[in-house]
Each structure stands twice: as structure tokens, then as C-alpha cells.
Image (cartoon, helix red, strand yellow):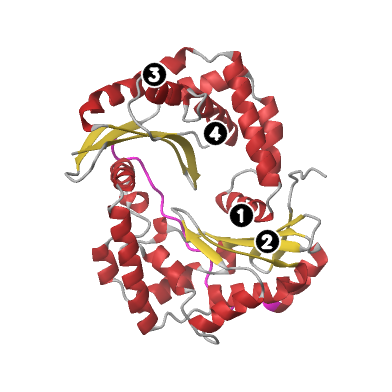
Amino acid sequence: MRATLREARSFRHGRLRVLHDPIPGPLTAIAVAVAAGSRFDGRHPGLAHMGEHMIFQGTQRFDQAELNRRAAHLGGDVDAETGHDDMTLTIEVFNEDVEPALELLAELLFRSTVPAERFAKERRVIADEIRARCDDPANVAYERAWARFFDPALGHPICGTIASLRAMRPSTVRHFLRRHLVPSNMVLCAAGGISARALGHALDRAFVAPRSPPRPRMQRTRIVATGRAGFRRHDSSQAQLIRLATAPHQPRAQLALGLALDVVGADPDARLFQELRERLGLGYDVSADLEIGIGWATTVVTATCAHEDTGRLRTAVARICGDAGAGFDPDEVVRARRKVRHRLARLADSRMDRALTHAARALTGRPSISTVAPGLDRLSHDDVEAAWQAHLRAPTLTAVLSA
């Protein structure tokens, strides 16, 4: 039987918003999205990412080894990730183990002690992660362009810097976790075989949070630089181009722009790929994505080439993006719709992806995933063309990292 996307049932567990997406089967995926991403770092770049690491390093009841044993006993790994807007925790377990899984998540989220010796160890781990990212020219180009485009609240690296890590203290992380990891700042989604009634009972018994302050206020972010920028890296073996452009905040306009980006973008049938890879043979890597957060959205186009071809690459990307403003062939838009429908079908088949998408969309105030397919059907060919034409007038930064 083919899986389908549906509206998740929403209810409240105290100050916590809960979503339930019933999917027949023996497993349930749980995702918790917290408005505690890097834009909340304040004066300590990398603070949210350090907090994500430290919640696994020891709590009021269990040390790091016992936390890992309890996760393994449930049969599924607990995973976490920090983004610009949110921190997410996930676990997938048998339906009968949802209650102990929720108890483990509550222990991690609400009772981390940030032990000083574990903090010192984890600071070394993250420093090594930062050094590895600095060895990747594509990541360096992305982070420098992102920092130039956005103000510091959103523009700094999620992992922070070596200097910001050295300035961080365990007490700083404890304060961050107590302030931001609170139920009013979270959305929890369970997608799988557990019933809504059983989920409610499990939450009552296991997902218990201490008294906490109200949801923190979010710092707004803004665009600070557009036009062109150049960065140097003498050990880079190739040039890296990053094109950032603001995207609309309205969901319908974002959906139309997403279709247009599929036409222009980096799939083998798309215009940029065909021009840069197949006709000009400029480089290997081409990508085109739409990134959306709370109060911001941007397209990200990336491409690579040899250093001597930097000018040709910049000209070609600008020309292909500009020429697309003249219109799309009907077949191009048909293919773009099929790609989105295929992604939705893959999403429907994954409990964890559904849980994560439900939670993240609810946290950021975006429409539920059940509205995407109907919204797609309501978009006309003219809507898609108009979305790209409007995008060409949006604030844009084209940055190149070269030797």
C-alpha cells in the first residue's frame, strides 16, 4: 500500500506542542525541534552547537556511557543536529518503547549538567570539526559568502570558531540550555504505529520538564551586503562560486520559486547543469537549493571551475539565471512538478523524515507538508515564470573563492 502524506494531529502537552502522524507498523519515529539554533548564540558563536554536543555528555541521573547504553537498549540511535534556526533531536523505536524513549529525550533536553571535564573534551572534538571544515574549500566559500550576505546573528558559522570555543565556559552552555531548551520553545512529533491515546499517556508519564521560563524572544536578521565579492585562499585547487539571493516569505511564492529553481538548477536536465557541465565543461560540482528559516529565505547556487576559468564561470551563471527570466518551456515545468512529487513520495515512505519535517515546519510557522501537493497543483506555468522573474530583482550576492 502506497504511503500518503496527511495533516498531523496537533495537541498540547502543557506548554509543549505535539504532532501525531499515525503510520501503520511496529516503529515510531520521534523528532523534537527546538528554536535554539545558531542565531541564538549571541556573543558566543557556536554556543548552540556546543549545547547540542553537551546534552549527551551527562545529566543529573546518568553519565555519558549510561545515556548511550539506554539508547542502545531501545534499539535506535539518538541523533541531534544544529541549524541556523533550530536544534533537533531524533530517535526511532518500537511502538512499545515510545515511553522510555521520551524519558531519555527529556533527560537529555532538561537535565544536562554540562560536566566540566566532558566540556573540555568536547571542545577539542568541535575544534577538530572546525579544522576539518576549514580544509574544505567549498565550505569555506559558503561560510564566507553567507557571512557577507547576512548580519552576524545569522551569518556566523554554526560551529563557531576556534577563538569563540576557547572563550566559552561550561556555565555559559548551562545557561543557554536552561533558557532555550524549554517546552514552550519546542515542537515534538511522533510518526508511526503508536496511537494518539498511547502517545498522550507516554508524554504524561515520561516527558516531564522542570518549571521553566517563557519562550525566549528571537533576534531578527537582515541582509547587509549584495553585489559581488571575492575571497582568496592560496591552497585552493579550484575556484568556488556561491550565488545567494533572497527569496519570498510567502509559502505559495516559495513553492513557485522552488519549481523555477528546479528548472534553472543543478539536476542533469536543468539549465545550469547543462550549460556549466555539459556544454562549457567548466567544473564538476553544481548545486541549487532553496533554504528557508524563521523570517528569512534564500536561494543558494554553487559551482566550481579551474582558477583560470573564474571569469567565464561567473559570466555563465549570471547569463543562465538572467536568460531564464524570458520564460520556461512547458516540458521544463512539467518535469519540475514531477521532481517535487517524487520527493514528496519519498518523504511519505520515511517515518523519520516525516516526523522531522512536521516538527520543523510547525516550529518555523510554515504550512504543513500535507498542503504542498495541493498547492503544487494550483500553481500555473505563469506563476512559476513570474516567481523567477521576481527573484531576478531580489538582493543578490555573487561571491568567488579563488587562489
Q: Earlier in the sequence, mark 2 or mark 3?
A: 2
Give the amino acid type for the residue marked by disc 1 in the picture: Leu
Please name the residue that numbered disc 1 is placed on: 356
Rendered-image quadrant of the C terminus: top left
Marks 1 and 4, how far apart at CA:
20 Å
Magenta segment boundaries in residue numbering: 206-225
Please name the residue that numbered disc 2 is placed on: 29
Identify which residue, 250 or 380, lies in the foreground. 380
Give the amino acid type for the residue marked by disc 4 in the picture: Gln
For numbered disc 4, what is the local secondary structure? helix
Could you tell whether 275 is left or right of 334 in the image?
left
Identify which residue, 306 or 32, lies in the foreground. 306
Marks 4 and 3, how far apart at CA:
30 Å
* Magenta run includes residue 177: no
Q: Residues within 10 Å of mark 3 (few under 14, many from 20)?
A: few
Magenta residues, dominant SS class: loop
Marks 2 and 3, how far apart at CA:
44 Å
Identify which residue, 161 or 226, lies in the foreground. 161
For numbered disc 3, what is the local secondary structure? helix
Please name which of the two marks, 2 or 4, marks the residue nearer to the observer.
2
Residues marked 1 and 2 touching at CB (< 8 Å): yes
Please name which of the two marks, 3 or 1, marks the residue nearer to the observer.
3
Give the amino acid type for the residue marked by disc 3 in the picture: Arg
Residue at the image position 33 percent from the left and 78 percent from the top: 120
Quick check: 79 above or below 336? below
Could you tell whether 132 is left or right of 175 in the image?
left
